[in-house]
Structures are given as structure tokens and as C-alpha cells.
Image (cartoon, grey):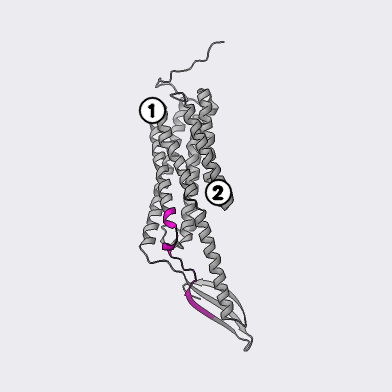
Amino acid sequence: MAEQYRPSLDDPNAWVPYRYVPSMPAAVVFVVLFAITTAFHTFQLVKKRTWYFIPLVLGGFCEVIGYVGRILGHKDMWALGPFIMQSILILIAPAFFAASIYIILGRVILMVDGERFSLIKQRRLTSIFVTGDVLSLFMQSGGGGIQGMKTASSMKMGEKIIIGGLVVQLLFFGFFIVVAALFQRRLTSNQPVKRHLTLKCWGRSKETGTQRLSGTPGFASNPVNPDDLPWKRHIYTLYGASTLILIRSIFRVVEYIQGNHGYLLRREYFLYIFDAVLMFIVMILFNWVHPSEVTDIYNKRLNNQSDVELQGARDEYLGHEFTVEQTKGGQS
């Protein structure tokens, strides 16, 4: 049987999966590194019950499996299956990281009771950015799948779709950083945020039999003071992670614009410097500054505040039958 024809790796007119033999040691190192940080994230996810961090954990698994694909590519660099596996999974992993990053900002806004300082309301913030992230994810994975058809036309079409998905990711990330920066500026330029409360208590007096409405204005026993909360370390962690993903996405855009025989694609070390290393740092950042702290503080404050308000209402209107409802700003 005649040996199957393989084009030269230096032929600029031929499409080849790799322009080099993938490095086994480099792939093994990052399989191990991503496996360790992903396992730790899984432990933190379950222990702290931060289910909104599931996308980041999924991204970690994508990285692990993607670099396993590069190990297989070292053994057979012409095998299409391992090439597609590593190409798509390593490409889309940061989109999963981005989804969790968007959600964290919303949690920080809730923790400091600072929705009025956000350019976008917290309820819409997550849905807007996650929608853009999902669009980017589908475009990148779809483009990678089309490239797997291994024809000249599919390669060009796949490259264009991937570039479009990366541009969408860049635009949404850029806007996200603007939203986060404006929120921080508005929050820090104002006085500590204190929640004004009025307890409206309807009751029927046992003595007169008449209903009464009474409001007790004042501050909650746990006023929200941003200076007492660790919101800055989480904001700066978001900035750091977002910047790393932006750099990586810019690298990928340039890489795909240059094409299959481009300068970046012909040098494997660029992939590890501007993708593998940066994404590993992103995962380590969130191992170190885990967002469960934000959720714990917010939930604890809400529980404490609710308990104090209800107890105060019972003490003040002892002897009356009443229900309690809470409003802001002292308006009935």
C-alpha cells in the first residue's frame, strides 16, 4: 500500500493541522497544572455552594482535555480528532471563565448595596454579558467545527467565524471593564452607603379595637459601609482576570488573521505564553480570591438585618396584633 501523501509543514499553500510537532512535555505540564487548579475549584464549588462558578470549572475541564488532545497530537500530528479536540476546547475555555466573571460583579454590587452606582442594573447586568458570552462561545466553537472539515473553503470560513466570535468577546469584555470601573468610581466618590429603613406596622389595638399604622424611621442595625467590606480585592481580581483574557483574545485574533501559515501559528511557544500561562493565572487568581466570600457576607448581612428588624417591631408593638413590612426611604 502506498504511503499517504503528507504536505510539507513549511508549504504556505497547504493546510496542515500543525506547523510543528506538538511538544509532549509542555502539554503534560499544563494538563497537570490545569487539573490541579480545576480540582481545587471543584472542591471550593461544592464546599461553598457557589453554583454560579460552575462555568469556570467547566472551562478548567476544557483546558485539561484540550491539552490532553495536544499530547495525542504529539503521538500523531496528522490525526484530525485530537487536533479538533484541542483546537476547540482550548479556544472556548476562556468564554466559560468570562461567564463566571460577569456574575461575580453582580454579586459584588449586591454585597455593597450599590446598584444605584452601576451603569447597568444588577438584574440585567448578568443576563446582558452572559448573552454576549454565549454568542461568542457558539461562534468560536462553530468556527472550529467548520475548520475540522479540512477543506480550503471551510478553513477560511471557520477562521472568519472564529475571528468574529473573538471580536464579540473583546467588545463585551471591554464594555464590562468600563461598567466595573464606573461602578467603582461612583461608589468610592460617595459617602458610605447606609440603608434608610421604615418599619410599617399595621395592628389592631386590643384596648380600642382600631387599626393603626406606624412608621419607625432610622438606620438598619447593620448599615452598609463599603469601607468595611472586602469589595476592592474582588473588583481588582476581576480587573486582573479580565485583562488577561483580553490579552489572550487579542493574541488569538491576530493568530487567526495571519492564517494557517502565519508567524504565530508556526511557533508553538506563543500558544503557551499568551494562552496557557495566562488562563492558568486566571484560574489561580480565583482559587486565591474566591467569590464565596462575597456571597457569604451578603447572605449574613441580610439574615442579621432581617432578624433585628423583626425583633424591634415585636418589642415596640407588644400587645398588638400586626404584620410587618419593610420599605426603603421611609415612604409608606
Q: Earlier in the sequence, mark 1 or mark 2?
A: 2
Lateral position of residue 320 relative to residue 142, left or right? right
Q: Is residue 8 visible?
A: yes
Front position among marks 1 and 2: 2
* Quadrant of the drawing holding the N terminus: top right
Q: Is residue 331 above or below residue 99?
A: below
Q: Is residue 148 visible?
A: no
The magenta stretch spans residue 62: no
* Residue 310 place in picture, x, y as percent: 57, 73
Name, please, the residue furthest toward the bottom.
208
Point 40% across, 27% down: residue: 267
Point 43% across, 65% down: residue: 225
The amino acid sitting under disc 1 is Gly
Answer few, some or many: residues within 10 Å of disc 1's Cα (few below 14, many 20 plus, some between 14 and 19).
Answer: some
Quickly name the residue at label 2.
Answer: 44
Using the image as rendered, state which of residue 266 and residue 50 is in the foreground. Answer: 50
Point 44% across, 69% down: residue: 194
The amino acid sitting under disc 2 is Gln
Point 51% across, 26% down: residue: 73
Answer few, some or many: residues within 10 Å of disc 2's Cα (few below 14, many 20 plus, some between 14 and 19).
Answer: some
The magenta stretch spans residue 222: yes
Residue 4 has which mark?
Answer: none
Q: CA distance from mark 1 to mark 2?
A: 40 Å
Using the image as rendered, state which of residue 145 and residue 248 is in the foreground. Answer: 248
Callout 1 touching callout 2 (CB < 8 Å): no
Circle 2 — which element? helix
Q: Is residue 311 above or below residue 111?
A: below
Residue 262 has which mark?
Answer: 1
* Residue 301 place in picture, x, y as percent: 52, 64
* Residue 270 place in picture, x, y as percent: 40, 32
Where does the magenta region start and end? 214-234
